[in-house]
Image: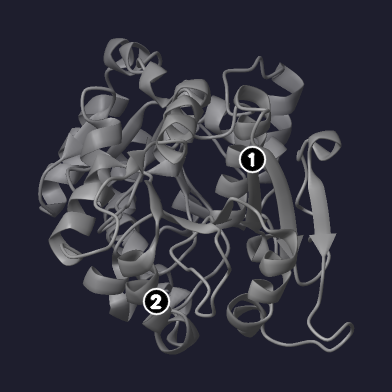
């Protein structure tokens, strides 16, 4: 079976959708090699796109009209269909909830749906996505031939918001990259990290793009008291997103303990894995997650996890870490401080059973689904 993969996400730094796509492609090549993948992109891949099994793939870099640069979204809807008709694949897979507007011959349209923020958190998205990308999401979900959901939570939301979509059956599954695992961090490495980020006793880790839906403002409000009571610093890993500058009013307030936090911005995955392995605790305060990838990455690296009791984080974290209901500030502070002071409990949270997130099992389900 021949599958064409929309790789527009590979034209920028490997985060989010691009990281998911790399991991999924690697897993397909490893566990379903009979599915032949052809990756198509309008421009060369970004230098951060690494780890693809190039010997098992075909890659086509095909800008529209040869050398004329046009927006990726225009290329996807109006130029990619031409290439698809020439290649005549069995399936055209977009690792996001978009499918071309123009006809693509007899190929089936497969999309991956990661969340429904277009319905529930539209205001937290960049204006250009709201105006130029989101209008196509409803069309794509309603008209896709095959739908791959990342979680049961997202599937239930699809049923809520798209009850009359063409394809009612979906396949469910997602996981983090196999590179996220427990490793032995040397004393030298640990000391270098501690010096680099001015860490004293230890640190709490947050990972994610700094944008409203991640609710980082709540975490910044509770950290001063947590730092005062425990001595654990907050390390914030993530590129700045929309409205990230709004956080400055919090951390620049009089008497805010600057030594309690550190923004690293974007870091490469190798260093992130080290941080997951060294962190005493991973904390998310997100308002909504379609899956909870950083939480799973942290658990895979043996880092205890605290998350809100909402959305897909219940599915991924509950019974493996600590989920906290509601947004009572003192409750969050007390539960986190109690956990940080309980070494036995922290130790018990370092080895959760995450076997249901094996890529081999997920790809097996995907293969059976698309061959039905």
Between 322 and 65, the one nearer to me in the picture? 65
Q: What residue would you read off at disc 2? A: 125
Residue 278: image quadrant is top right
Q: What residue would you read off at disc 1? A: 25
Residue 254 visible to the viewer: no
Residue 174: image quadrant is top left
Quadrant showing the C terminus: top left
- On the image, the x and y values in percent for residue 126 come to 45, 80
SS class of the residue under badge 1? helix
Residue at 47 percent across and 65 percent down: it is: 210
Please state which of the two labelled residues, at mark 2 or mark 1, is closer to the viewer. 1
* Above or below, comparing residue 222 to residue 76 in the picture: above
- Give the crowd class for mark 1: few <14, some 14-19, many >=20 residues within 10 Å: some
Sequence-wise, which precedes: disc 2 or disc 1? 1
Q: CA distance from mark 2 to mark 1?
A: 27 Å
Quadrant showing the N terminus: top right
Between 178 and 297, the one nearer to me in the picture? 178
Between 234 and 326, the one nearer to me in the picture? 326
């Amino acid at each position: 079976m021949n599958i064409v993969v929309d790789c527009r996400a590979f034209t920028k730094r490997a985060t989010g959708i691009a990281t998911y796509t790399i991991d999924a492609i690697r897993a397909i090549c490893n566990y379903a090699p009979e599915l032949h993948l052809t990756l198509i992109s309008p421009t060369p891949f970004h230098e951060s796109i690494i780890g693809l099994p190039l010997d098992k793939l075909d890659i086509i870099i095909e800008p529209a009209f040869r050398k004329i640069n046009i927006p990726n979204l225009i290329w996807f809807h109006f130029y990619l269909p031409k290439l698809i008709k020439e290649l005549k694949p069995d399936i055209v897979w977009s690792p996001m909830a978009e499918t071309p507007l123009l006809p693509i011959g007899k190929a089936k349209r497969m999309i991956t749906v990661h969340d429904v923020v277009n319905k529930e958190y539209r205001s937290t998205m960049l204006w250009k996505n709201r105006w130029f990308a989101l209008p196509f999401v409803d069309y794509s979900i309603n008209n896709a031939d095959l739908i791959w959901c990342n979680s049961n939570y997202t599937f239930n939301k699809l049923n809520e918001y798209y009850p009359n979509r063409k394809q009612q059956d979906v396949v469910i599954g997602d996981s983090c990259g196999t590179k996220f695992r427990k490793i032995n961090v040397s004393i030298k490495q640990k000391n270098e990290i501690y010096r680099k980020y001015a860490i004293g006793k230890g640190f709490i880790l947050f990972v994610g793009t700094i944008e409203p839906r991640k609710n980082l403002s709540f975490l910044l409000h509770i950290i001063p008291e947590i730092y005062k009571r425990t001595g654990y610093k907050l390390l914030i890993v993530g590129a700045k997103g929309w409205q990230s500058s709004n956080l400055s009013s919090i951390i620049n307030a009089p008497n805010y303990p600057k030594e309690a936090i550190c923004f690293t911005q974007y870091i490469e995955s190798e260093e992130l894995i080290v941080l997951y392995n060294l962190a005493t605790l991973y904390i998310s305060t997100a308002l909504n997650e379609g899956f909870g990838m950083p939480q799973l990455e942290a658990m895979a690296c043996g880092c205890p996890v605290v998350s809100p009791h909402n959305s897909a984080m219940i599915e991924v974290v509950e019974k493996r870490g600590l989920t906290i209901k509601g947004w009572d500030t003192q409750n969050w502070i007390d539960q986190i401080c109690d956990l940080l002071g309980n070494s036995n409990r922290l130790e018990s949270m370092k080895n959760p059973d995450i076997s249901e997130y094996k890529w081999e099992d997920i790809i097996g389900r995907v293969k059976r689904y698309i061959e039905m």
